[in-house]
């Protein structure tokens, strides 16, 4: 079956996935932000095949030399985009926890779903597209998933889950994967159907959390 070329054949050293330098001055930080925004815009509106350093620089309104001043290649730009989005999502989650610190995970889910789907909504879709074309960036997303699973485990334990450690980890991973999938569908849906999908997704998530609390059979386990 024809498909994307196998990148493991004749493998070359992996390109750097970190910025050349961390911007210290406000103007430099603004430039880096423009470069990130330009990369995201290209992926969302023109597609990943159009993504290259020249195109990113043009959309960002900077020279290619300026882009290379901060990033060695487009992979490093995308790595910076993903890391920034991950930090944004984690800040949102932390804020929601502080707003209602005594609420159960199931009760908190509605606020979390609505906030993530309305604020950094496009991030969910763009991240999915990026990882399909640039598997070398998966380590960044895996780190985010690991942190998210850890937060879910802490919440389940605090809420009194009856699961042992192994089953708890499996349940938390499933809840995170299910939530990510449902958020993707919510972001993709426009119009009146979105609210209905939000309500249905919350029902599904609460059922998954209830299973994790009682030790019931999880459909994704």
Image (cartoon, rainbow, N blue to C red):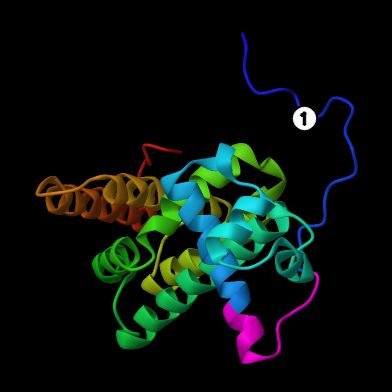
Q: Position of residue 37 (x, y in %)?
A: 51, 65
142 or 84, which lies in front?
84
Residue 15 position, x and y percent, is 82, 50
Q: Position of residue 68 (x, y in %)?
A: 77, 64
Q: Secondary structure at mark 1?
A: loop
Question: Which residue, as the protein is rendered here, is positioned at the far left?
Answer: 192
- Residue 93 visible in this rendered orientation of the protein: yes
- Residue 26, image quadrant: bottom right
Residue sitting at x 39%, y 45%: 181
**Rendered position, 116 above or below 215:** below
Vertical position of residue 99 compared to residue 136: above or below: below
Residue 76 colored in magenta in the image? no
Identified at 36% across, 60% down, the residue is 121
The residue nearer to you, when weighing 178 against 192, is 192
Is residue 164 at all visible to an observer of this figure? no
What's drawn in magenta, residue-wise?
A: 20-30
> Residue 26: within the magenta?
yes
Q: How many residues crowd mark 1 within 10 Å: few (<14), some (14–19), many (20+)?
A: few
Could you tell me residue 82's position as x and y percent? 58, 61
């Amino acid at each position: 079956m024809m498909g994307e070329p196998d990148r493991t054949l004749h493998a070359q050293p992996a390109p750097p996935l970190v910025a050349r330098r961390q911007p210290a001055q406000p103007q430099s930080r603004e430039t880096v932000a423009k470069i990130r925004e330009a990369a995201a815009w290209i992926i969302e509106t023109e597609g990943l095949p159009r993504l290259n350093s020249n195109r990113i620089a043009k959309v960002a309104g900077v020279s290619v030399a300026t882009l290379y001043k901060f990033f060695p290649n487009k992979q490093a730009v995308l790595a910076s985009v993903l890391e920034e989005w991950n930090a944004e999502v984690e800040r949102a989650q932390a804020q929601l926890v502080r707003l209602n610190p005594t609420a159960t995970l199931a009760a908190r889910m509605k606020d979390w779903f609505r906030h993530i789907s309305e604020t950094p909504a496009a991030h969910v879709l763009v991240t999915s597209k990026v990882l399909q074309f640039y598997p070398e960036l998966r380590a960044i997303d895996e780190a985010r998933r690991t942190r998210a699973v850890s937060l879910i485990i802490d919440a389940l334990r605090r809420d009194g889950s009856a699961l042992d450690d192994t089953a708890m980890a499996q349940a938390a991973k499933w809840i995170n994967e299910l939530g990510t999938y449902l958020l993707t569908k919510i972001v993709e849906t426009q119009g009146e159907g979105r609210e209905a999908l939000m309500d249905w997704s919350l029902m599904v998530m609460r059922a998954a959390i209830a299973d994790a609390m009682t030790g019931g059979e999880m459909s994704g386990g």
